[in-house]
Amino acid sequence: MKRIYTTAEAAARLEVSVQTIQLWSDEGHLPAWRTKGGHRRVDADAVDAMAARHAQDAGSGSARMSIIAIEQEAEAEQSLRSQLREVCADADVRFFGDVFAALLDAGRAVPDLLILDSAMPGADPLALVQALGRLPATQGVRVVLTSRHGSGGRPDLIELPHGVAWLPRPFSATHLGSALERAAPTAQHRQAG
């Protein structure tokens, strides 16, 4: 009998969002099918093989950039994923649909970069950046805040700490690359603030 995972189980095993599993199955990276009830099922052996490859890559000592991206909307995640492939193709990118899951993961493996939608429900981006700057383990994390408010201003943020890159949506891979360059480690956010 073939072993299967639900999309939630596959997402937990691979440490990505459910939306990422759905995208990977739609793109053919993971064999999946739908039940008669319309629920997606994923081949467990393919998920386990992918997890083993990721673990091997992580253990190889490579200096790949580690990125946590927090994005609730599947379409925005897919767009950001595509742009990140253009800007930093060899980065280890972990996507999450909510802030709390991302922070729990960051406690396990501190990222080099955090990309966060400034209007994410349940998130106070300024408090998050300040907290990252106070904790010794996360002082090197760079932050890019995205906004759906466009280039007309930042109504959701009054003043960004020094070194936090702000990126209005929609944005191109070129704009994303520029924001990555502008983002400074969170220790500098604390010192400048």
Image: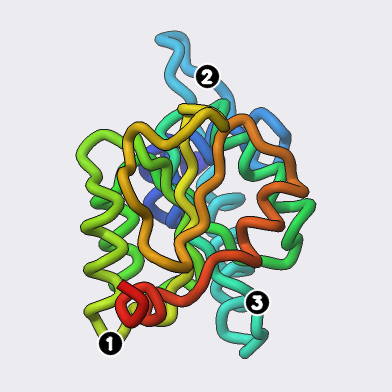
Asked whether residue 108 appears in the rendered view, the answer is: no
Q: Which quadrant of the rendered structure holds the C terminus?
A: bottom left
Q: Is residue 25 above or below residue 9?
A: above
Left or right: residue 187 versus residue 23 is left
Query: Residue 51 location, x and y as percent?
Result: 54, 62
Q: Secondary structure at mark 1?
A: helix
Residue corresponding to mark 3: 64
Closer to the chain start, of discs 2 and 1, is 2
The residue under label 2 is: 34
Mark 2, other Cα within 10 Å: few <14 / some 14–19 / many ≥20: few
Q: State if disc 1 and disc 3 touch (CB < 8 Å).
A: no
Viewer-proximal residue, 170 or 67? 170
Residue depicted at 46% across the width and 27% down the height: 149
Percent position (x, y) of residue 165?
52, 57
Neighbours of disc 1 within 10 Å: few (<14), some (14-19), many (20+): few
Mark 2, secondary structure of its residue: strand
Q: Earlier in the sequence, mark 2 or mark 3?
A: 2
Q: Residues within 10 Å of mark 3 (few under 14, many from 20)?
A: some
Query: x, y (%) of residue 153?
Result: 47, 33
Q: Are marks 2 and 3 in contact (CB under 8 Å)?
A: no
For disc 1, the marked residue is 136
Badge 3 amino acid = Arg
Q: Is residue 93 left or right of residue 131?
A: right
